[in-house]
Amino acid sequence: MHEENEVCLTGIISKIYPAVVTPAGVSVARLVLEHNSEQVEGGIKRRVKCKIYCVYVAGKILAEWLNCRISVVGFLSINSQKEIVLHITKIKNLD
């Protein structure tokens, strides 16, 4: 059975961590994405803010993207500390 797990989110890159390399030799870019928007829930406008830790396997995040607005598509998982992580599969710089 295939379960849906796709997230589309825009926000500002507030932190870029040094890339790490897995034991298999795959580079993993890591960042924090801050989202800030207004959404409608139950007919009422609601201010939404969140920060989410993201990884981008076999992808690159350029240092000059810090504080830039991006759009990402990916899926959610948890890391070894049981924290939610957004695994980026597509990324676009909006600046």
Image: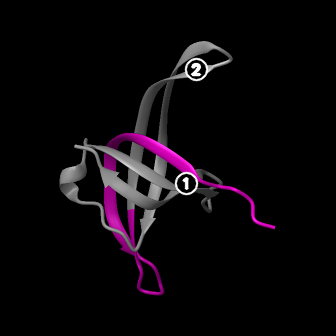
Residue drawn at point x = 25 percent, y = 43 percent: 68
Residue drawn at point x = 62 percent, y = 58 percent: 77
Q: Which residue is mark 2?
A: 40
What kind of element bears circle 1? strand
Residue 89 within the segment the image draws in magenta:
no
Closer to us: 28 or 82: 28
- Work out whether 49 lies above or below 23: above
Image location (x, y in percent) of residue 33: 40, 44
- Work out whether 39 lies above or below 13: above
Image location (x, y in percent) of residue 80: 62, 62
Q: Which residue is mark 1?
A: 85
- Work out whether 89 lies above or below 44: below
Closer to us: 23 or 54: 54
Among the two numbered marks 2 and 1 on one chain, the one whose residue lies closer to the N terminus: 2
**For the image shown, how many numbered marks are present on the structure?**
2
Q: Amino acid at mark 2?
A: Val
Residue 14 within the segment the image draws in magenta:
yes
Closer to us: 76 or 79: 76
The answer to whether residue 75 is left or right of residue 38 is right
Q: Main secondary structure of the magenta part?
A: strand
Q: Residue furthest top?
A: 44
- Segment colored magenta: 1-29
Residue drawn at point x = 18 percent, y = 53 percent: 64
The circle drawn on residue 77 is: none
Give yes or no for contact between labels 2 and 1 (Cβ–Cβ under 8 Å). Answer: no
What kind of element bears circle 2? strand
The answer to whether residue 14 is left or right of residue 3 is left
Q: Residues within 10 Å of mark 2 (few under 14, many from 20)?
A: few
Question: Where's the N terminus, which quadrant?
Answer: bottom right
Q: Amino acid at mark 1?
A: Val
Image location (x, y in percent) of residue 15: 32, 47
